[in-house]
Image: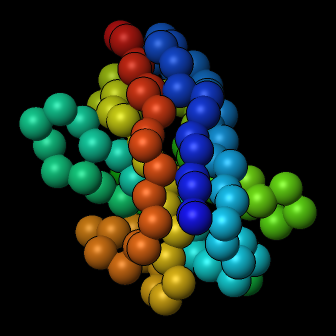
Amino acid sequence: QVQLVESGGDSVQAGGSLRLSCAASGLSYSTVCLGWFRQAPGKEREGVAAISRYFIPTYADSVKGRFTISRDNGENTLYLQMNSLKPDDTAMYFCAAAKWGCGVSTGAEYNYWGQGTQVTVSS
C-alpha cells in the first residue's frame, strides 16, 4: 500500500521560512516523479514544484527563487524548502507521486497523494 505522509506545516510570519517533508512508502520511490501541490480555501489546487526521477526540478512561477524542492532516495523522503513566505502562500500543501509525467499544472498525472500539511503565513 502506498503511503505519502507530509509534515512540517506551521504558522509563520511573512518573510519567514518553513521546510516541508513527505515520507513515502510502498512504491518504487526512485522511479517516480514527486511533486508538491497546494490548495487554499475557495481556490483550485495548484502545482508548486516537482522533481523528476533524474532530480530535475520544475517550479511554478509564483514560487521560483523562493522555494526549493529536493528528494532523498535513500530515505524515501521529499522536501520543500520555503523561504520568503508570503500570505498568498497560505494553503494546505500536498505531496504526490507520478509514475508517468512530471508537471506542476493540474496534477492529473499524479497517482498517489498525501493527506496534506497546513501552512499559514500571516502579514
The answer to whether 70 is drawn above or below residue 97 in the figure is above
Answer yes or no: is residue 53 visible: no
| The quadrant where residue 60 appears | bottom left
> Which residue is situated farthest in the bottom direction here?
100
> Which residue is situated farthest in the right direction here?
74
- Residue 69 lies, in percent from the top left, at 64, 55
Residue drawn 70% across the image and 78% down it: 28
Observer-nearest residue: 109 or 3?
Answer: 3
Answer yes or no: is residue 92 visible: yes
- Residue 123 lies, in percent from the top left, at 35, 11
The answer to whether 13 is drawn above or below residue 59 in the figure is above
Residue drawn 24% across the image and 36% down it: 40
The answer to whether 47 is drawn above or below residue 93 in the figure is below
- Residue 85 lies, in percent from the top left, at 48, 28
> Which residue is situated farthest in the front direction here?
1
Q: In what quadrant of the picture does the N terminus appear?
A: bottom right
> Which residue is situated farthest in the left direction here?
42
Q: Is residue 77 left or right of residue 61?
A: right
The answer to whether 23 is drawn above or below residue 111 in the figure is above
Residue drawn 43% across the image and 43% down it: 115
Observer-nearest residue: 35 or 68?
Answer: 35
Please tell me how many numbered marks the rendered image carries.
0
Q: Is residue 74 left or right of residue 51?
A: right
Residue drawn 47% across the image and 33% down it: 117
Observer-nearest residue: 111 or 89?
Answer: 111
- Residue 39 lies, in percent from the top left, at 28, 43
